[in-house]
Each structure stands twice: as C-alpha cells, then as structure tokens.
Amino acid sequence: MATRDVKLLGTWSCPYVNRVQLALKLKSIEYEFIEDNPYNRSEILVKNNPVLKKIPVLIHGNKPVCESLIIVQYIDDAWPIGPSLLPSDAYDRKDYFGGENIGYIDIVLGSSLAWLRVTEIVVGVQLLDQTRTPGLAKWAERVISNDVFKDVLPETKKLLELHEKIQAFIKSST
C-alpha cells in the first residue's frame, strides 16, 4: 500500500496513537505520520474529526477513521494480510492474550506500558510486580521485548522529559 493512501494524525507520546502505530506495523502497512499538537489542533485534524477534534485519526484513501480502538479493528478488517489482530478462537490463549501472536488486547494494553514505566519512576512504586502479579508482569516483559513494540513505544527518558515539562507548565499556570 502506498504511503500517500494511509496517513496517521497524532503525536509521538500518545498511547492511543501508539496503538494505531503498533497495528499498522504488525500488518506491515506503510503510512505517513503527521505530527499534530492536541492542544493546538490543525486544520487537517478538525477537517477529519470535526466532532471530537481528537487524535488519533487514520486517513485511508481520503476517508477518516477516528478513535483508536475502532481504528485498530478497521486496520485488521481493511488489511487481511499479515497476522490477525483479533483472535479467531476465543479459547486459544498462550503467550499473549490472543494466543501465540500479538493481538488486539496486547496492542490495547501494551500501548500504555511506556507511560506505566514513567508512572512507576515518578511515584516510586513497581506496579507490575513478579510477586503480586506474576502473569501480568511476565506478559508485560514479553510484550516490551517484542521488536514491534520496541520500534513504536516512546523511550522512557523522552517521556520523563515530557512529564517534567508538563509539570513545570502546570506549576507556572497556578
């Protein structure tokens, strides 16, 4: 699929945008990423999501698709090539939530793991603990070590810097 046919409006630090990026990468779909500031909405965002005016927005052949969960389902339906993101057998559960391959729930939950790391550092508490939540902690490590997630999820250091900027802005505003 040519890049000009698929565009994604979003920002690098948004886990909802990361969901869509993960789905596109898992399906090997080339796309153009258009960085959009959610606090200073662009004309292209307002045009393609006039009701909510929120990111992410996937534009496929000049038709917008909004809301990250709907976009991930759309990607799975529109491009049947590659691995299925939605499990064909609801009872087939192995290494990932969707079985042996990364699927829909892994994308939905895994897209938040980068911000979860930041939260753990800022608060000083390990939320996914091998002792208290061994299965969930094992799943998170497996997902984070996957090459697709490594390529898409923002680095902890960059997110921490963004967090500090946001906190400084909040303090200066009050």
Image: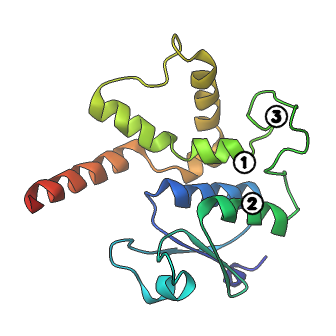
Foreground mark, 3 or 2, reads: 2
Q: Quick check: 151 left or right of 53?
A: right
Return the x and y of residue 169 as percentages of the image width and height: 17, 59
Q: Residues within 10 Å of mark 2 (few under 14, many from 20)?
A: some
Q: Quick check: 24 left or right of 87?
A: left
Mark 3, residue position: 99
Image-quadrant location for residue 13: bottom left
Q: Amino acid at mark 3?
A: Gly
- Find out whether the residues at labels 1 and 2 contact each other: C-beta distance under 8 Å: yes
Q: Residues within 10 Å of mark 3 (few under 14, many from 20)?
A: some
| Quarter containing the N terminus | bottom right
Which numbered disc covers residue 73?
Answer: 2
Spot the residue most to the right: 89
Mark 3 vs mark 2, CA separation in Å = 17 Å
Which numbered disc covers residue 104?
Answer: 1
The residue shown at (51%, 44%) is 112
Give whichever of 145, 79 is nearer the camera.
Answer: 79
Q: In what element is the residue under mark 2? A: helix
Q: Earlier in the sequence, mark 3 or mark 1?
A: 3
Q: Residues within 10 Å of mark 1 (few under 14, many from 20)?
A: many
